[in-house]
Structures are given as structure tokens and as C-alpha cells.
Image (tube, coloured by chain):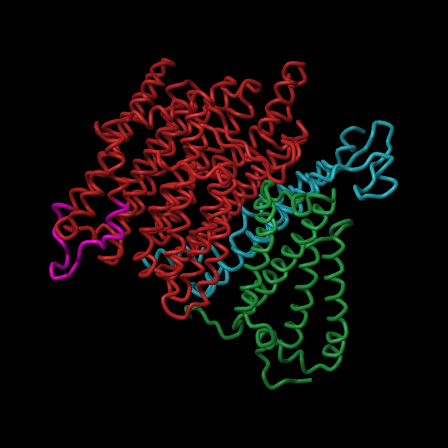
Amino acid sequence: MELVLPEAIHAHLPVLVVLLPLFGGLLALFTGLIQRGGGFVAWLWSAIITGLILVCAASMLFEVHTTGEAMVYRLGSWPEQYGIGYSVDALNGYVILVVAIIGFLSTIYAKDSVMAEIARDRHHLFYSVWLLAIAGLIGITVTADTFNIYVLLEISSLTVYTLVALGGDRDRRALVASLKYLILGSIGATFILLGIGYLLMLTGTLNMNDMHEQLVRMHQSGELANNRTVFVSFALLMVGLSLKMALFPLHLWLPNAYTYAPSAVTALVAATATKVGVYMTFRFVFTIYGGVYDSSADLYFLGLCACAGVVISSMAAIRQMNVKKVLAYSSVGQIAYIVLGFSLANESGVTASVIHIFNHALIKGGMFMAVGAVALRAGGTKIEDFKGIGRKMPLTMAAFTVGGCGLIGVPLTAGFISKWYLVVGAMDEGYWGIAFIVLLGGVLALVYIWRLVEIIWFGKPDDPTKQVREAPLSMLIPMWILIGASVAFGVDAGWTADSAHAAAELLLEGGP
Amino acid sequence: MESLGHFNYWLAIVIIMIGFYGVIARRNLLKQVIALGLFQTGVFLFYVTMGVYRSPDGTRGVAPIWTDAAKTGPFDNPLPHVLMLTAIVVSVSTLAVAVAIIVNIQRKYGTIEEDEILEADKRDS
Amino acid sequence: MASPDRGRPGEQMSQQTLLRVVAKMTIPFILVFGVYVILHGEIGPGGGFQGGVILAAAFILYGLVFGADELRRRIPPPIIDACMALGALFYASVGLASLLRGGTFLDYGMLKPHHAGDGEALGMSLVEYGVGLTVCSVMVTIYLMISERRSTIRPGEEGL
């Protein structure tokens, strides 16, 4: 790989992936001083920054895979127990790469979409907040300090609320959706904070690995037996995290927030924000409580919620009259698949979860980009706007259709690989019901995707004289990279499966 | 007596629950956000209480400032207090974003009552 | 004292001699106290957050008494925006400086490697100044945004 960086920068990579968007976001504010073309400069600046992040993230994962060890970085050179530590291993190196890829491609995509949807005098603010959101999302993934997770979670959430609210220029419902998201998101974050507080009380530390060690020590000395503090902290964290990752039935903020946000924001947020929530859940359930707290009952309950989520949200998706909302409900269902995977707590199940984080990010990112392109060219995302649009925007709609096949889980697409692992995981545990639910989810996905595909390719436009052009290249390229990758990783799943497998092994090291 | 010793924790949980109830029960957006603030404040109280030191014989820790008392005797754990400093800033930022959004909702809808907003949306679609 | 323009409380208030005089007398003290709290933060209670808020209180008091428009004339919003970014950038730059000097990010000791403790003190103080600047300008911005065209916005009108 040619991505090997100079030795001096090399050791600082874990902090650089956060510092780059942080500095970049603050500096992007100054592009507002440029009188003409400031928006373009801000976009170019964001594209460069996110491109650099992608290089850093890729070389980090490469390094982790070649050495087989975690990269540890200590801010301010404080020892692990006192200071904030950043650590990159096979799991979060992978999630950072997902965020970095989506961050870069959706920034490229954002150029025309933002031009059309956001008022000109606010472009520098938009890109500033955009980069800060990416900084928060990557920060959550890279840090090994639980309180730091909370702070970065709030940085990413607050910026995302703002980005969603920017959709209010076009549709005032974005404001209400954003406020709902803010209130529910803050409740979730506060529950997480409370859970971390109970953990801090119990262990006296904030570092994840140190927390785990303290818990193991207490477990071995028998202090944890019937200890209600550990139970309460786990329960609080699960509620907070479920809200953050929009696990059914705590998903109420998601459909409207995704629907009314600006197109580029939806592509970024749908592909990354909930995935990072899932990543946090992995960390808490497996890295911190793994082997010390018997979470099988809680995981069983999460699994039940996920099963209900797969079926009910897919059924809700069928009834929607707005294509963005169909995809948003479908996202709730796909998150439920991910949760279902790790609630099995066996190797195939967790591998399915990790692999689906990546696959779903590719598919949903690409599909939301396609819908955003229609919003740009046809002026809306209602079902009526999609009638017969396949003949006018063939490339965009082909991407949408291929992505839809991925959601259904057609063989040779990435979605099939995830479902395969999920079914294998369920079989290992002897849960035939889960295998059935997965297949039922696929059938329901077929219904809501086919309904759209039929309208797109065979529908008659309401107004045949309406001029609709193909999407610009700056949108088509990122869209097709994502969709193309989802097909490529469906045909040859070697790399994703290996990475996901390494991550799953790492998670299950300490036991469920 | 033991339950009285946990007075602050009781209070924190009561405040958290009052705030939580307010977020769910109020239909006015601004009131919801105020209740959200209360909810978060309860958590701050919880953390601050956690840091207070009291030894089994009843001696209290002193403030963790570099003074003679703190050099020799027990002192309160400053870590949760510092964490809450950050969390307060986060809470203020949340409040600021929420109020900014509510101001815009008022401008676009002419109301900040949830029921009226839902009705207006229904009329639109 | 009745003012002809009743819709703008700021202007109405600035007609009141007592308020004007008291505000003018207290604002310098508030500012000095805010700076003191920021400077003191390194060794005692206080610091950037608290000091920044106190500083902002002085500006907000000025805005309340003399009107937000007057405050906006004295400190134009673009400057406040720039201060917001500058403060945070200053913080991050201190961290970056220690990184460039061979330590890790925010490793203050590297700022003055040969004097034990000096680098930490320097780093912490500098960081607090950055925080103070950002917090102060953010608070003033929040005040200005909420007070913006308060009496002129009607339902359905374009905001911001």
C-alpha cells in the first residue's frame, strides 16, 4: 500500500483523524470573509480535509491489521488511568474507515446539493458544522475514555441537529423534526452520562480498559455478586444507546429527521450516526462488561426489540408516500438487523453486525444520494416526483435499484453477505425463529423496494412536459462508488468478512 | 439512617424524574426544553454528590484546592466536579441550539404549542 | 418616562438616567472581575468558562440597557463570530504546539521542557484564555441571536 505516512506523523494518526476536521471546521468559518465564491472555497476545503482523514483512517487500519496490535495514543502523555487515551484496534479502525469513506464521498456529493438547498450566505457555516459533525463521529469511535465518548457524542449530535434544522429553509417541518431529535437525543445522551456515572462510582476510572480490569478484579473477589450498581449502569446505558442508535421502539425521532434534512446531510447521517451508536453499544456490552456481567437476559430483550423492529418498521416503510421516509423506516429495520446480530453474542452473529455496519452504510448512503439527486432535478422526494423518472435519470435510478437489491439481500450484493452471516449465527444458537424473521424482513423489503422500482421505471409522469435532466457528475460519481462497492463486496466479500471477523473475535475475547 | 445518608442521591433522582416527566408531559416546546435542562441538572447533582468525600468516622473532605488542609487531610474527588463543568457547557450548548430552533419554529409556524404545530402540518399535507 | 417607541425595550431603558449611570459604572468592574477569574483559573477556582460567562454578562448588560442594536454597532457580529473560532483555534493550537515539539497532543510539559511545571502552567493558562474568549463570544452571540429583531418578526416571516 502506498498509504504509508512519514514516521513522525505516523504515531499521531489516532489524534489527527479528530484534529483535522476540528481545525478544518473552525477554519472553514473564515471562508465566510470571501465575498464571492466563498461557498465553493468552503466546499473545496472540506473535501481536502475529509480526503486527508480518509488517507489517515485507511493507513491506521492497515497498520492495525499488519501489526495485529492496537494503536494507543495518550493525550498530554498522561498515564492511562488519569488522562484521555485514544486507541485504535481492529473494530474501531474499521468503523473509522466507514465514517471516513462516507464523510469524503458525501462531501464531494454535497457541492451541488448544498448549492441548491442552503442559502448562499450560510455555506461557510454549513461546511463548518459539517466538518465538526465528522470530527464528533470519528472522535466517538477513536476514544477509549467513556466521558470523552459523551462529550464527543454531544458534539456530533448538536451539529447534526443543526444540520437537520437547515432543511427548514425548504420545508418548515425540518425544524420540528430537528427539535424532536434534539430532545430525544439529549435524553439518550443524559441516560448514557448517568450510566457512565454509576460505572465511575463503581470503578473509579473512566478509561474503558481500566474499567474492564477493575470490574474483572471485583468479579473475581466476589464483590460484583448481587451488586445493583452494575445492573443499574448497564440498564441506563442500554436505554441511552438504544435511543441513540434508533432501536425500535425508540426510533421515533429518526424518520422525520432523515426525511426533512438537506439531502447531503441525510446521506451522511443515515450512513454514519446510527452506526456509531451501534459501535458504542459494542464497546459497552463487550469491552467493558464482557465476561463480568451476565448480559444474556438484556441481550435477549434487545433481540426481541430488534425482531419486532425488523417486521414493524418494514411494514411502516411500505405505507409511506415520501421516498425519503421509506428509506428512513428501512434504516430502522436495518439497524434492527445489526442489533439482532450482536444480541446473539456468538461469532457469526457479531460478524454479521460488524459487516452490516459497513454494507448498510454503503447501500443506504448511495440510495439517499440517489434520492437527493432526484430532489435536486425534480424538485421533491414524494412518490409522484418519482413517476417514470427512470427514463430521464437512468444512471441515478439504476444506482437506486441496485441499492434496493442490496436492502432486500439479493445474492451477489453486500446485503446478502450480512444476512447470510446473520442466519448462520441464528442457526448456531438454534433460533429458527430469527432466521425466519430475517427472511420475512427480506420479503417485506422486496415489497417496499418493488413498489418504488415499479413507479420509477414503469410509472407515467403526471406532467410529461416537465424537463428533468440526469444528475451532475459530482453526484453520480460518489453515488456509484458506494453502490459499486456494495456490489463488489457482495461478489467478493473476502476483505470485509476478514475485517469483520477480526473485529468480532476481538469483541468476544472477554466473553459475552 | 442509611437512607437519609443518601439524601442527595434521592434528591438527584427526584429532580431527574421531574425533568423527565416534564419532557414527556408538556406540550409546549419551550417547556419541554426547560424540563430537559432540569433533567440534565439532576445528573449534575448526582455527579457532584459522588465526588464528596466522607470517611466512616464522619470527617468531611475539604475542597480540592492546593491549600494546607488539602495537603494533609482528605479532600473531595475533583474528577466528577470537573466532568460536570464540561457537562454544564454541553447542556448550555444544547439549550442554545434548542432555543435557536424554537425561535425559528415560532417564526415559521407562529406557535410553539406541539398540538397546533401538528395540526398545521396535517393541513399542509 | 414614556418613550415614543414602546416596542423596543432596549431603547426605552436607555432613557432612564439611573439605569444608564449604574450600568456604565458597573460594566468596567464586571469586566475586570471576569478577567480576574480567567487569570486566576490556573491555581484556584475559576477559569475560562466562568470568566468568559462573567465577561459576557458585562456585554449583555450593555445590550439590555442600551439596546442590542447599539451593542451590535459597538462589536459587529462578524468580529464576535471570528472570536468564537479564534478562541477554539487558540486552544487547539496550544495542543498542536506541544505535538510539534515532540510530545503528544496537549502535552503542555513540552512547551518548556527544561523547567518542570512551567510548561504545564503556561499551557493551562493559554488554554484558559482561549476558552474564555470562545465562551464570552458564544454567550454574546446567543443573546444577540435571540434578541434579533424581536419585535419585528411576525408569524410566517422569514427568520434569521
Give me the chain that's green: C
Residue lying at 36% horizontally and 50% vertically, measured from the top left:
A107
C100 on left or right of A273: right
- What color does chain A have in the rendering? red
Residue lying at 18% horizontally and 54% vertically, measured from the top left:
A470
Residue A476 position in % (x across, y down): 24, 49
Quarter holding the C terminus of chain B is: bottom left
Residue A22 position in % (x across, y down): 50, 50
* Number of numbered discs visible in the structure rendering: 0
Residue A447 in which image quadrant: top left
C122 on left or right of A127: right
Residue A346 within the segment the image draws in magenta: no
Pick whichever, B37 or A355, lies toward us: A355
A353 on left or right of B14: left
Quarter holding the N terminus of chain B is: top right
Residue A449 in which image quadrant: top left
Residue A469 within the segment the image draws in magenta: yes
Residue A283 position in % (x across, y down): 51, 29
Pick whichever, A333 or B69, lies toward us: B69
Which residue range is magenta in the image?
A457-479
Q: Is residue A502 above or below residue B30?
A: above
Pick whichever, B99 or A359, lies toward us: A359
Residue B49 position in % (x across, y down): 73, 38
Give me the chain that's cyan: B
A155 on left or right of A325: right
Q: Main secondary structure of the magenta part?
A: loop
Pick whichever, A434 or A377, lies toward us: A377
Q: Is residue B114 above or below residue C16?
A: above
